Amino acid sequence: MPGVGIERARAEANPAGDLPDGGQIGDRIALEVAVMDPDGVEAEILRLASPGGHLLDIAPGGQAQTDPPSELCHGISIIVIVGQHARADRIRQMFDQVAPRYDARNRLFSLNRDHAWRRRAARRAGLKPGDTALDLCTGTGKLAHELLNYVRPGGLVVGIDFSPAMLERARKLEPGVEFRLGDVSRLTQPDASVDAITIGFGLRNLLDRTAGLREMFRVLRPGGLLVILEFAPPPPGLLMRGYRFYLERVMPAAVGLRSAEEASAYRYLADTVQAFTEPLELAQLLERLGFRVAFERMTFGIVAIHTATKPSS
């Protein structure tokens, strides 16, 4: 198992005796922290040492050390760093790997509908000449390109992605866009500094979607729009069964004729599509974060566009 960084922090007491998750201070606390192994899919479980509630520290060599129960009196905050970083690295490597053929695969597997989806998402952004737009998880910059027509003259489109290979290709294909390597959950833009944000087929790949959405809310100007273009599970029935077969079998098999590693990447993409939240649930999350939200389904319900407005006051 790789080295694990765990940070412990004492939480302040809640006057009502309730913890944020609904538990009671003084209840027996059982912690299970799954730490992803970056070389595989196994997880190692770290548990409290005893029913008394001792907290495990992972010391060099894998030996466990315990703190007295008094350390737990007001709650525990544990941040596991290595697992998330390892997963992010694996996802980045996967996108770097598929970058050269990414656009061609999208056209093939969407039956060339991906262009129409992006154009509609760009229209929903409500941009005008002189505006500033961010395209997050920009990939090869196809959605960012669609935004250029709306902000010219005098406007700016910035595409942000964490895959260097994707950005290298994007800069060659879309010279009118300013591309930057970055983390969507930690944007460098100032508060209330952009007029619109788009994110196409990238939200489901974020390790912490809520943190990313909060960042988007922060950098949007009041009245600005966030447009999320993402796959969605179709309604149950024959279409759902056929769609799952297409995702799970057809796409990886077609890619696997060329590369076993790329087939693995597309199996991952298929899994994230099927595991992604329903459009209504995503709309409810956006509303809890402060947005006003509308959404629409397209192409037999397999794709959804959420248009989220940051209130003006």
Image (spheres, grey):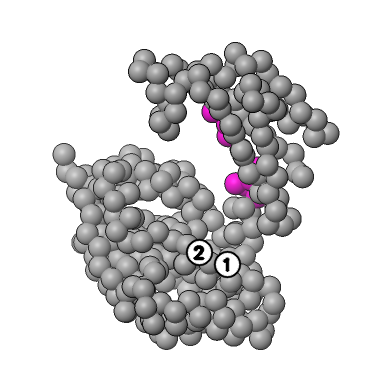
What residue is shown with label 2?
272
Residue range corresponding to the magenta coloring: 77-86
Q: Which image quarter is the C terminus in? A: top left
Could you tell me which secondary element the residue under label 1 belongs to? helix
At a point 28% along the width and 71% down the height, the residue shown is 297
Viewer-nearest residue: 163 or 20: 20
Magenta-colored stretch includes residue 259: no
Residue 281 sits above or below residue 289 on the image: below
Residue type of the residue flagged with mark 1? Tyr
Residue 77 sits above or below residue 245 on the image: above
At a point 17% along the width and 43% down the height, the residue shown is 312
Q: Is residue 139 left or right of residue 115?
A: right
Query: For residue 31, which quarter of the picture?
Result: top right
Query: For residue 130, which quarter of the picture?
Result: bottom left
Residue type of the residue flagged with mark 2? Thr
Q: Is residue 207 left or right of residue 230?
A: right
Q: Position of residue 175 (x, y in %)?
A: 44, 68
What residue is shown with label 1?
268
Label pair 2/1, CB-CB below 8 angstroms: yes
Sort mark 1 into few (<14), some (14-19) or many (20+) by Cα contacts within 10 Å.
some
At a point 65% along the width and 44% down the height, the residue shown is 35
In this view, which residue lies farthest toward the right?
61
In this view, which residue lies farthest toward the left?
313
Q: Position of residue 23 (x, y in %)?
A: 44, 28
